[in-house]
Image (cartoon, rainbow, N blue to C red):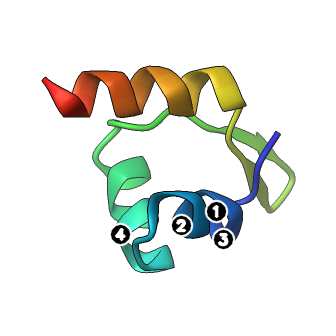
Amino acid sequence: MLTVAQVAGHCQVAVRTVRRWIAADELPVLQLGRAIRIVESDLEHFLRKAQR
């Protein structure tokens, strides 16, 4: 499971951009209390879909 900051670093975008993807329901997340985590397989699926 990845943090928003880790996803931003991996995708070479700003944290704000990742939060926009989440808010737009483009990138699924798990919310554990106040912590947001992204499952690696969900990120891979999102990136494959974005390349089309």
Identify residue for label 4: 17
- Rate crowding at label 4 as few (under 14), some (14 to 19) or many (20 or more) other CA atoms within 10 Å: some
Above or below 29: residue 2 = below
Above or below 28: residue 7 = below
Give the Cα distance between marks 3 and 1. Answer: 4 Å
Identify residue for label 2: 8
For the residues bearing labels 3 and 1, Cβ distance under 8 angstroms: yes
Give the Cα distance between marks 2 and 1. Answer: 6 Å
- Rate crowding at label 3 as few (under 14), some (14 to 19) or many (20 or more) other CA atoms within 10 Å: some
Residue located 80% across and 62% down the image = 34
Quarter holding the N terminus is: top right
Above or below 51: residue 17 = below
| Residue 31 place in picture, x, y as percent | 74, 44
For the residues bearing labels 4 and 3, Cβ distance under 8 angstroms: no
Q: Amino acid at mark 3?
A: Ala
For the residues bearing labels 2 and 4, Cβ distance under 8 angstroms: yes
Residue located 60% across and 57% down the image = 7
Q: Earlier in the sequence, mark 4 or mark 1?
A: 1
Q: Is residue 52 left or right of residue 18?
A: left
For the residues bearing labels 4 and 1, Cβ distance under 8 angstroms: no
Identify residue for label 1: 4
Q: Amino acid at mark 1?
A: Val
Q: Earlier in the sequence, mark 4 or mark 3?
A: 3
Identify residue for label 3: 5
Snapshot quadrant of residue 29: top right
| Residue 8 place in picture, x, y as percent | 53, 66
Q: Amino acid at mark 2?
A: Ala
